[in-house]
Amino acid sequence: MYDVITVGSSTIDVFADVESEEIKIKTKDGEEELIAYPAGSKILIKELNFLTGGGGTNTAVAFSRLGLNVAYLGKMGQGSNSGLIVKRLRKEKVKFVGVNSKTFHAGYSVILDSLSGDRTILTYKGANNHLRFSEINKRKIKAKWFYFSSMIGESYKTLEKLAIFGKENGIKIAFNPSNYLAEKGSEFLGKLLLNTDLLILNKEESELIVGKGEIKHLIQKLMELGPKEVIITDGKKGAYTISKNYFYNVVPHKVHAVETTGAGDAFASTYLASKIMGKEIIDSLKLASSNSGSVVQNRGAKNGLLEYKPLLLESKKYPAKIKKKKI
């Protein structure tokens, strides 16, 4: 039996380092920052890096490096790119228990960095959108936890069915949605949220699901939809949760962010891994914050992920601050 089976996308990530400008525009909801490039120009790429990514494989690697027995469930496309992804998973001691496609190509992303260190991602989902529940070998997916990252199309319907399968077979569910799922609202996500044990998402995503409000109230509204535990992240302000009538805020140690891709995956997977290892909530939040901080200091979603002992040392050397208030 696996400790965790991650279910989500797998991609080849291309990091393109190019000259760009940042502009701000006014929208109906306020201001929005955009990365701008001259129209009709040929723009030179200063540096190009090819890495593997996707929420499903990023978190699988994170769990594995922390010492858990992990498998990845997704749909691999045809061609050499999927071979590179599977090879990386094998190197990281992650078992592939998914499906191979003869029709679709592997997922592919182009990551464009801004001057502020944030990024814009151009994503081709490919085979990731076409995972069918009927294709999955149910005998291979015995686990303590399913970790769901964001999936759309036919694959989202499969997440709903896997959640029910999990509940029927004693498998707990962790869910980390994205903006393009959150914007569909609570009614669309209802079946999945009802079967979720741990929901981890950022502030923007939480507001798309339940409306704007203070983070404490957002957590409470989300818990009313089914999840037993909710964590909301909010960039440099850290992460928030409610447990046993206490409101927690973990504030990360300041680091120099090179690139933020994978920070959310690192936080969510490390928190769940710590929980599986029996850590108390404060220790779990601190470890999650430290691993996320390590990732943003590196290019790529996997390069900064720490193994368990180095993560403990990092967390003690540069501890995150925990604020705790009685509700």
Image: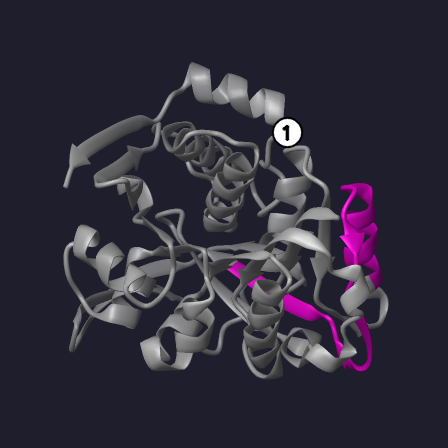
In the image, taking residue 289 as reference, residue 156 lies left or right, namely: right
Q: Which residues are magenta?
A: 83-111
Frontmost residue, 30 versus 291: 291
Instruction: Let me know if residue 38 appears in the view.
Output: no
Frontmost residue, 222 versus 18: 222
In what quadrant of the picture does the C terminus appear?
top left
Q: Give the image location of residue 111, x and y in percent.
A: 54, 59
Q: Is residue 132 above or below residue 323?
A: below
Circle 1 SS class? loop
The residue sitting at 50% across, 34% down in the picture is 291
Q: Quadrant of residue 22?
A: bottom left
Q: Is residue 321 above or below residue 139?
A: above
Q: Quadrant of residue 254?
A: top left
Frontmost residue, 295 versus 97: 97
Q: Is residue 274 magenta?
A: no
The residue sitting at 69% across, 77% down in the picture is 131
User: Number of labelled discs?
Assistant: 1
Q: Is residue 107 magenta?
A: yes
Frontmost residue, 294 versus 286: 286
Q: Give the image location of residue 4, x and y in percent.
A: 65, 49
Q: Which amino acid lies under the numbered mark 1 shown in the image of this protein? A: Glu
In the image, taking residue 190 as reference, residue 12 lies left or right, namely: right
Q: Quadrant of residue 226?
A: bottom left
Q: Name the residue that disc number 1 marks.
A: 307
Q: Give the image location of residue 315, x and y in percent.
A: 45, 22
